[in-house]
Amino acid sequence: MSNYVEEGLKAGYLTKEKYIFRPLNRGLAIKDSNTGKEYPMMEGCIRGFVLKMDKGGRTYISPFKNLEEQKFFEKALNEENLSPTLNNPFWDKYTVRIEFSRPTITGGKEFDMMNINDNLQVKVLKTLSNVALSESEANDTSKEYLLIGSEVKITRAAKQAELGQRAFALYGQMAGSVDKMREFLEVYKIMMNKQSISLKVDSTLDFMTAEVYNIVTDEVENFLEVKESKLYDAYVVLNNAIKAGVIERKGIDSYQIVGTTTPITKSHMIDIINDKTTDEYHSIRQQIMLNENKGKSKSKNKE
């Protein structure tokens, strides 16, 4: 162990922990034609991250806790001046470069906080406003990346295992049923705005089972959010109304009851359906039933 590592550990500037940095995957996705899995459009990109400046662009935000820590890094890196001042040659050129390969996107890039270079890169990433530093911060849609300690990742792994058990139990209840698989995929497509899911009238059970299985394994939290939602049945009604021609989709997040002139947001439409007391709801249900009865009559006539 080098002298600077011993000194850094003793002073608390270096630690034995590891950090994981990964994208939050909020962007557009591409679909692997072989596996059917979705991956972010950023796959294969190399991105550079630089030390954040203050709002006026007058100086850099210091990545160090205090001057003593700055002096330690200057000594360890053999740099004369790491002051976060504008036109500092070190910070003007310093970039944390990360290649977003598929493993990095799904599992994250690991930084060893005992390594002086990794440690400094983590300090720089922590200054950025689009980087979440906790699971709760990751819920903020302005955050594009997540940076967490490895012990947090271990905790999350345990949580993922628990989520997986719940998800596969629900998946098992749908297994073998064309109607249940189709219903879930159609509802999932609406709730999550997943236009990449392409269902056809003649989609096979095998195809739909593979689609649902991929969601369970790759998007378990989204799967549970949909399947365990108290509004799931309301979304089923919305989906049936769309198929019956009672409601039309207007854009990504708006719907319109046929015969009316005002588009309604998805959340408002779900509120109307979930209420079950409004005139709009009863009209929608009546039209769906009429459509279903017409379908049954046509089937009998064919027989």
Image (tube, helix red, strand yellow):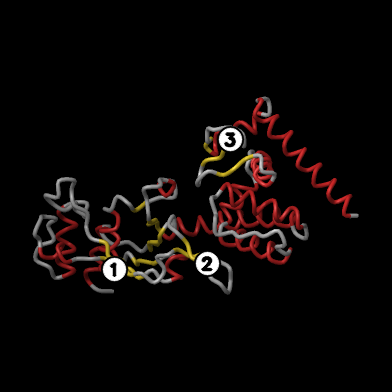
Q: Residue at x 14, y 70 (%)?
A: 78
Q: Is residue 153 left or right of residue 124?
A: right
Mark 1 lies on residue:
97
Question: In the rendered image of this protein, does residue 39 appear above or below residue 282?
Answer: below
Under mark 2, the amino acid is Lys
Mark 2 lies on residue:
31
Under mark 3, the amino acid is Met
Tag 2: Cα neighbours inside 10 Å, few (<14), some, or many (≥20)? some
Residue 269: numbered disc: 3
Tag 3: Cα neighbours inside 10 Å, few (<14), some, or many (≥20)? many
Say which quadrant the C terminus sits in.
bottom right
Question: How many numbered circles does the render carry?
Answer: 3
Name the secondary structure under disc 2. Answer: strand
Query: In terms of sequence position, does the residue under pointer 2 or pointer 3 come before the other?
Result: 2
Return the residue nearer the eye: 259 or 88: 259
Q: Nearer the viewer, mark 3 or mark 1?
A: 3
Q: Is residue 81 left or right of residue 111?
A: left
